[in-house]
Image (cartoon, coloured by chain):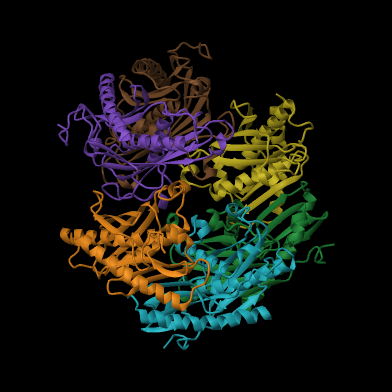
Chain colours: A cyan, B green, C yellow, D orange, E brown, F purple
């Protein structure tokens, strides 16, 4: 029995609010239950120095949490003078996931930076971030097409993410905080809309997990991500 | 004529949403027109080391902006490895303003940290922050009273802030971004609910300002802050 | 009664020694009583990158204190790896004050950096710094004129600063350390030689201050700054 | 056809040299072909502050590369003032993998820090690091047992790691640099000696990968890790 | 012929002004010709953590230069976020030199920190710093004796320093800037008042130097330091 | 009697292994007894910005220690966010020593960076580093000659280094750790193959040292360096 009463394969209520803030070319509030993340996509008509002259664009991401997004206050990373290891790991994951959705050559020498800032955390902030960032990225790409900054749509398809894990001995999908801290295994899966895998990151928190458990978790992830991509598409069509 | 059509003494529509996020003891979304700031107040049952054993509490504040709260993206301070001078100046101002509202001895050896994070900027982020932070602080104090962490209410009264300036040669109240960048003089005023001054920070951007202009700006500030304190009180009574 | 026996409107003995060190284009030792600051103005025949090609110059400032300028030793900022919030706040204030005295277009694409380093502190280091920095800046400008680096004098007039405050319930001018720590209100005022205001920064340390107190402090500041500008002018004419 | 002529399921020649340097409680040189890593395990009779009094120990890891371990020189992280995102990601992975091999309560309030420093890189530095670090950790634990620092052996079993990937459309095991840069998919797998999984981190570099490809890679990883654990055991028994 | 017309064995005019600033327990302005350094000695009634409980004291030093102490402006180390290699090297040298003059056990668990801040540089800032720091240290020790913080005088004797070098093929003593930049060899020597050596740091800038040149330089250093120690003693007796 | 039974003038067994790692243009493992350092020389076909257009090259060096190269583990400098004073001092010494061996104009606008990373420390890491770095530099120069990057050999001759000191009242050569910590005086000497001095850095750890002791130490250094340069030459000729 899950704390929320959800079935093992059931994701939390997911809402995606576009145009959440005013200035960014793409701006989304994504909510996975009580986890809430603001994702903004910013277009820049240049690329990082190491990419100059290579005829391709770039998509990158940064991640942060407001200090009191969590149960107790975390020190502000800007005040401590550096981003922690967890932050770096997550923002690298978001960026790789988004790049998998885009043909960088069609972007031309332009860059999109997606900022994911968690304003309320209840487990699954990285998968919510990827999911919301994808929608913000689509809006930014549509802005670029409308502005004539790019001629051809560089989007290869939607990408979304979900966490799965072994909780109380059972595989479950989209863990909330209470499940997350108690889970024996935690796995983040990023998939394309045609069910292929972009990232699979599974970690045994306590006991090592078996091949069968891995397969069960992957099956749940596939199902959950299909649901989430539906929510993305509905948000984009509204 | 102001860009918004407001009268010189008219503040923008101000809304204060309490309990905006789930975890903090006080959590407020404050909006001054299109300027939007999340203010969370976090209670800690200890004080900084330099205050230990002195029988008093502390109130402090931190300020940040999401990278794309502004028209073009700013570099994330956590990534650049330090808080800029403007950030430090603002968070020191917020903290001093809040401390003016609290009897630190009645707090006992406990600390409240208020985080002000701008999610959308359109001028006046520091005055909106002070205004929202004050409400979050009241909620945190009420939490402490309810929990028995403090016996006596340490609140000395409400504090709020507004910007005033000389725009197109005329004194105006609560400048939005378009006014702010064009203003000859910019002044931030923090006042108590009985009309006394806590902070006055006036800066000539172009021409130096006269004594008469200062008086006219102060009169507008007094009027605007009275309106803002009304909004704070309505929010707290709802 | 003030610790020094001064009248309320009386500034401390102020001396300005030009050519205090050998290398800088302007080099001043400014003393407000026991507060002593070395101010050097350095000319550079280029501007920061963000100003390149805009046909104007720049004036900036940095501030520091020797570790034992104060009663007890402060940690050296170079050793702690960053400038503190107070330092940043002060150097931004000095720079804005100096820029108010200069027509940046007449400077051409050149920059003057004024370093203010406190070698002995006894209250009022930021107002002493502005006052001394102004004289060093004039010497640097005269150097530039003599060298033919600029054709037309970009100086718009003198600028000076003084602190005022409420000490033992009375408004006083140019607070020394003993007054500063006990003051209920502390205000720094920067004015032009024709009595207009460039910066007004008033802070209630304990009790909020009234409109009448503000007016009384401003009147003292105006008087004090007039005296200080006389000292500047005498120093420059000698 | 692989550049080295290896079969798809064949790991590189692996050698583990114990007691490679003199001072550490465990010191290993691990070589996966041309990838060479020095792994030292250091015992400390205390735990980090946040673990004090909880009656358990800790195992952590740090990772670095000599600047010229790679084809072209990388900037020294100590000189650039921070560890990069890749470094942080890897050292967190090593540490989690090692902790999965140890019963932290049996360690008592003591800590083992394993440093993995790459002196020559040719792909797979993180999996070589985990493999070598495990042996250094066993030596450190044996030192602690011999010294009487712990009573009961906290080791739960061996842990090793290997990379697998899709290279030229075929799943292969233990990628060297030439394969790594060309691989469509790269996956690092950490397993226990009884074939259970501790970490699975798969990343699509170009194309997303299918469920079948994932299964094929996992099968190769299982086989490779079994071979590697044999090498670990032989090293430990010599 | 030297730029100043000095003889090869002649040091510049050296003046030592005690009680140069007000707050430090020892405060000295030392001038070696146009090189001017403020040296303050600060007493603290505790030792660094790593010395606690060892029954001895500590003497340490920090070194800095005002940004415009030199011909062109150097970046402020506090602004660049770290002390450079040259600064660290010099402050370690000063500290070692001072510790050679003091019996640390007689200091008890107390610390003296000497700050050497160059306000004007014309060659030899490190040797001037050591020379002035020694006098400030003596004043701080006398303060400690007078205050009863120490019972027995821990001073073992005076220490002073001078630079020597090969300039235009000839050994010379106490190089000023013009000589310093042109010297083939530069050597800093720190000696006790009985002519023994504490530090000898010789560097070939261009050509390597011979044994005979080393001997000639050492002879000059011995002579120069004897003169400098006389100046120290006169300053201390006045 | 020395701990190792060596004569006073006897250096430890010294071995120099060339081509120790695969990627660098010069790569050496140098061993002075139990002190072991990896020295790699990296060629770059450009110079630092401040040297651009001056028609000369540059040789620089960086130094590091693996955290557990020493008896107890030292904090990793990359993790603490900066290089310590000792590290900076040593890498500046290595770089100056190497530059003394090279005609920088003949290098053209190219740079060689030598990294010295101590993998096992037993005293004398800086002199071992200089000695090994010199051999790696020669290999890098030979690579540049072979590749046609330079036309004329810029090498002026070999350079090597040794430590000497006063141990138990007697001058000894090439101190190992046990001698180093007990030595009254410690001196590092860098010489050319024709017996001239490049660097002499002597430090009294306890008692100041006399002129006679200095001469005795220099004589030992000269003898030791001659032996070491023989080892360098044998390594280079093999």
Q: Which residue is found at the position 42% from the left and 57% from the top?
A: D177
User: Quarter of the image holding residue D143?
Assistant: bottom left
Q: Which residue is at the far right? A: B1
Rendered location of residue A49, percent (x, y): 60, 52
Q: Name the image quarter holding the C terminus of chain B.
A: bottom right
Viewer-proximal residue, B158 or C56?
C56
Viewer-proximal residue, F92 or B142?
F92
Can you see residue C34? no
How many numbered marks, from 0 up? 0
Viewer-proximal residue, B72 or B47?
B72
Rendered location of residue D132, percent (x, y): 30, 59
Residue A226 vertical position relative to residue E93 in the rendered view, above or below: below
Q: Name the image quarter holding the N terminus of chain B.
A: bottom right
Rendered location of residue C106, percent (x, y): 77, 37
Q: Which residue is found at the position 36% from the left and 63% from the top?
A: D6
- C197 left or right of D154 in image: right
Can you see residue B183? yes
Residue C148 vertical position relative to residue A113 in the rendered view, above or below: above
Rendered location of residue C69, percent (x, y): 50, 38
Q: Which residue is found at the position 43% from the left and 19% from the top?
A: E165
Viewer-proximal residue, D91 or B115?
D91
Residue F15 vertical position relative to residue E29 in the rendered view, above or below: below
Residue C230 vertical position relative to residue B100 in the rendered view, above or below: above
- D132 left or right of A175 in image: left
Q: Which residue is found at the position 32% from the left and 68% from the top?
A: D224
């Amino acid at each position: 029995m899950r704390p929320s009463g959800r079935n093992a394969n059931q994701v939390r209520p997911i809402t995606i609010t576009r145009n959440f803030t005013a200035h960014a070319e793409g701006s989304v509030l994504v909510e996975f239950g009580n986890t809430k993340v603001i994702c903004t996509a910013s277009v820049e008509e240049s690329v990082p120095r190491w990419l100059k002259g290579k005829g391709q664009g770039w998509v990158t991401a940064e991640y942060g949490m407001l200090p009191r997004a969590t149960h107790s206050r975390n020190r502000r990373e800007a005040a401590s003078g550096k981003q922690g290891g967890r932050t770096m790991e997550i923002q690298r994951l978001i960026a790789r996931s988004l790049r998998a959705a885009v043909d960088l050559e069609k972007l031309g020498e332009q860059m999109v930076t997606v900022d994911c800032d968690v304003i309320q955390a209840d487990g699954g902030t990285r998968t919510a971030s990827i999911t919301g960032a994808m929608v913000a990225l689509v809006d930014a790409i549509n802005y670029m097409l409308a502005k004539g900054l790019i001629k051809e749509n560089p989007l290869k398809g939607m990408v979304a993410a979900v966490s799965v894990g072994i909780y109380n001995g059972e595989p479950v999908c989209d863990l909330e905080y209470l499940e997350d801290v108690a889970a024996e295994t935690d796995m983040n899966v990023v998939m394309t809309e045609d069910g292929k895998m972009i990232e699979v990151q599974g970690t045994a928190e306590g006991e090592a997990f078996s091949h069968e458990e891995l397969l069960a978790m992957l099956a749940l992830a596939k199902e959950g991500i299909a649901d989430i991509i539906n929510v993305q598409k509905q948000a984009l069509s509204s």
